[in-house]
């Protein structure tokens, strides 16, 4: 039992399926929504900030000119999954005019995540975007859609893909079948092969401004005070996803510790990082900190290619480290995060983590 708000239906039912981020009551909650609310969830207006991008996508949808492969780029918490779901719904919508309509069978199944023509693969799950999995997708892509006008492959966290898997994906992006749509999400498009990036349309998402972020989160977390939400907005620099994590699951400690650890990695002395890593005395905290470190590493990559970032530590790392070195560090952090899925000894984990991070 977890007292966590469902990411899909926004209820707090105490029954959260952690692997999916949605509660066991999601379908019931969805069916209970007013029709206007269901329709609203399929609209670009659900995406915070990014006004220019929403206008561009609105025109693309109206003209039915969505490229066969799109990549949604942005830090964790900026709405990549929200936008990916909207685009997937657009692709399977059967309405004659405005798409996605939010009312047809295709839209409703897409929102419930039970549409047979939307294939979801998440790089956070072991093997989901392996070379063998990508090869199976390639075979599936040539099979005609069951119900929808096209088949949609929703590939999440593609920056976790290994090079062989990316090369396998490249083959179908070069010669895509008809009526097949690829929608990918990445924290940084630069983590993907240049040949992949050249064959997709990249849409970049950025955090909302502090005031807009406060307004959005106030609607979702009515039990939080304005002061609490404003503080979270300032700490997270308008990143709504990180704000929700901080306010609902005590993420402020993890965020602060991760920022301090990234700064300590760049210091010549070993003791500061060793002391900080020694604070990872619970599995939940260690997981949260490493997830935050992964976000910071992605921000460093973005800063390395000239994009604005909210983290001072990430910006400093981009100035001091080469892009190759930052990418290697990100891989090490991910390996450490995966290790926490095993029966690792936490008393030794902090010391080991300090050692491997300092070798990068």
Image (cartoon, helix red, strand yellow):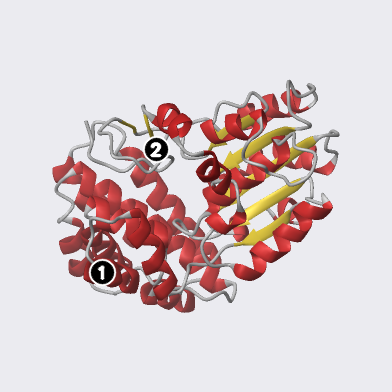
Q: Which residue is mark 1?
A: 226
In the image, residue 321 above or below residue 69: below
The reply to whether callout 2 and callout 1 are in contact (CB within 8 Å) is no
Q: Could you tell me if residue 359 is visible in this image?
A: no
Residue 310 locus on image (x, y percent) = 42, 73
Instruction: Classify residue 111 as left or right of residue 142.
Output: left
In front of the other: 219 or 169: 219
In front of the other: 333 or 218: 218
Dot 2, crowdedness within 10 Å: few (<14), some or many (≥20)? few
Residue 36 locus on image (x, y percent) = 54, 44
Residue 273 quadrant: bottom left
Q: Quadrant of the N terminus?
A: top left
In the image, residue 110 above or below residue 185: above
Earlier residue among tags 2 and 1: 2
Residue at 72% in and 50% down: 196
In the image, residue 178 above or below residue 39: above
Q: Which mark is residue 21?
A: 2
In front of the other: 104 or 301: 104
């Amino acid at each position: 039992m977890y007292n966590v708000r469902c990411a899909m239906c926004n209820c707090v039912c105490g029954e959260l399926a952690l692997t999916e981020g949605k509660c066991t009551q999601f379908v019931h909650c969805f069916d209970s929504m007013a029709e206007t609310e269901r329709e609203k969830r399929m609209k670009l207006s659900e995406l915070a900030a990014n006004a220019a991008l929403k206008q561009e996508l609105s025109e693309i949808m109206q003209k039915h000119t969505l490229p066969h492969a799109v990549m949604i780029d942005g830090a964790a918490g900026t709405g990549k999954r929200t936008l990916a779901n909207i685009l997937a719904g657009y692709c399977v919508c059967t309405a004659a005019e405005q798409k996605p309509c939010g009312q047809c069978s295709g839209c409703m199944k897409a929102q419930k995540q039970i549409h047979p023509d939307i294939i979801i693969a998440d790089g956070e799950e072991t093997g989901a975007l392996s070379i063998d999995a990508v090869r199976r997708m390639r075979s599936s892509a040539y099979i005609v859609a069951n119900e929808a006008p096209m088949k949609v492959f929703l590939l999440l966290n593609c920056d976790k893909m290994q090079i062989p898997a990316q090369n396998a994906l490249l083959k179908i992006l070069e010669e895509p079948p008809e009526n097949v749509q690829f929608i990918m999400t990445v924290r940084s498009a630069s983590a993907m092969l240049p040949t992949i990036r050249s064959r997709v349309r990249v849409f970049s998402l950025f955090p909302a401004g502090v005031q807009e972020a406060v307004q959005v989160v106030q609607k979702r977390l009515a039990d939080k005070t304005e002061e609490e939400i404003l503080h979270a907005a300032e700490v997270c620099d308008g990143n709504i996803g990180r704000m929700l994590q901080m306010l609902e699951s005590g993420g402020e400690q993890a965020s602060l510790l991760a920022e301090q650890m990234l700064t300590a990695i760049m210091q010549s002395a070993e003791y500061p990082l060793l002391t900080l890593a020694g604070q990872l005395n619970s599995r939940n905290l260690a997981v949260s900190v490493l997830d935050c470190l992964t976000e910071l590493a992605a921000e460093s990559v973005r800063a390395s290619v000239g994009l604005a970032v909210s983290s001072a530590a990430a910006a400093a790392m981009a100035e001091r480290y080469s892009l190759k070195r930052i990418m290697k560090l990100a891989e090490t952090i991910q390996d450490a995060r995966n290790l926490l899925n095993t029966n690792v000894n936490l008393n030794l984990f902090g010391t080991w983590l300090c050692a491997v991070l300092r070798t990068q």
